[in-house]
Image (spheres, rainbow, N blue to C red):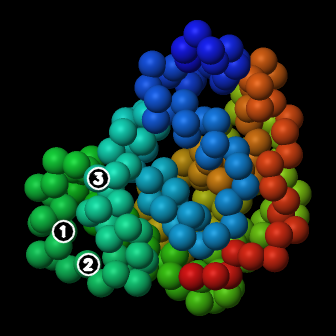
């Protein structure tokens, strides 16, 4: 935050990291319904497990390049040779379990798109057109239910905490803190008709 920027933000936002500030101000808590956005953030949230979101965010461009700009139709075809290349890529979080799980999860993500018409529509079966406003939590009954269903489908690194963080990132749970300038703002609507576009 510079001298001309006196906005108050959520306590977790590192004001010394311009990319983090941009993410907080223009992306986190903003409703996402496009499949490409839902997929990218899903993969990135997976890699956050055990790490800080800032760590993942700082490597976002590296992930975009390595994962073919999150083109799910390409990622599901990644083979062992590609996996070995990813494990050598310094632009990524080089965790073998997460990399392999990201590819397998992508296949399941694609299956869900085919089953429901879109991942957006899959999520809507749990959320029912209502943005949730709450702070100070890391899990909820909602994230528990989604997590259990994804685990039933054999996804990995999709515990309730990861899913809750994901729902915050895509704006379905709005968790801007009371003293943040974005607190309580309705940024988007779950009644938007998009979400099935791929």
Q: Give the quadrant of the N terminus.
A: top right
Tell me the quarter of the picture where residue 115 sits. bottom right
Give the vertical position of 121 relative to 24 (above or below). Answer: below
Q: Give the quadrant of the C terminus.
A: bottom right
Name the residue located 47 percent from the left edge and 68 percent from the top edge: 155
Find residue 55 and report its horizontal and vertical position in percent: 37, 36
**Label 3 Cα neighbours within 10 Å, binned few <14 / some 14-19 / many ≥20:** some
Task: Give the mark nearer the N terminus: 3 vs 2.
Answer: 3
Report the front residue among 154 and 95: 95
Name the residue located 16 percent from the left edge and 54 percent from the top edge: 89
Left or right of 113 in this view: 59 = left
- Helix, strand or loop at disc 1? helix
Give the vertical position of 182 relative to 8 (above or below). Answer: below
Find residue 61 and report its horizontal and vertical position in percent: 34, 52
Disc 2: which residue: 78
Disc 1: which residue: 83
**Label 1 Cα neighbours within 10 Å, binned few <14 / some 14-19 / many ≥20:** some
Q: Is residue 74 visible?
A: yes
Find residue 70 and report its horizontal and vertical position in percent: 41, 69
What is the C-alpha distance between the residues marked 3 and 2? Answer: 17 Å
- Helix, strand or loop at disc 3? helix
Disc 3: which residue: 62
What is the C-alpha distance between the residues marked 2 and 1? Answer: 7 Å
Left or right of 194 in this view: 83 = left
């Amino acid at each position: 935050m510079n001298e001309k920027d006196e906005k108050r933000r959520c306590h977790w936002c590192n004001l010394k990291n311009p990319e983090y500030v941009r993410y907080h101000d223009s992306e986190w808590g903003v409703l996402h319904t496009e499949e490409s956005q839902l997929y990218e953030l899903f993969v990135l949230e997976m890699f956050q497990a055990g790490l800080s979101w800032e760590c993942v965010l700082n490597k976002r461009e590296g992930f975009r390049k390595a994962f073919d700009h999150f083109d799910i139709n390409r990622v599901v075809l990644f083979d062992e040779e590609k996996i070995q290349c990813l494990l050598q890529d310094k632009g990524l979080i080089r965790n073998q379990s997460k990399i392999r799980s990201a590819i397998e999860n992508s296949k399941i993500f694609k299956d869900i798109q085919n089953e429901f018409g879109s991942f957006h529509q899959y999520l809507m079966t749990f959320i029912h057109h209502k943005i949730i406003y709450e702070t100070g939590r890391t899990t909820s009954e909602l994230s528990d239910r989604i997590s259990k269903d994804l685990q039933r489908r054999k996804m990995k690194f999709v515990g309730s905490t990861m899913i809750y963080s994901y729902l915050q990132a895509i704006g379905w749970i709005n968790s801007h803190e009371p003293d943040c300038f974005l607190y309580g703002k309705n940024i988007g609507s779950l009644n938007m008709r998009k979400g099935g576009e791929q």
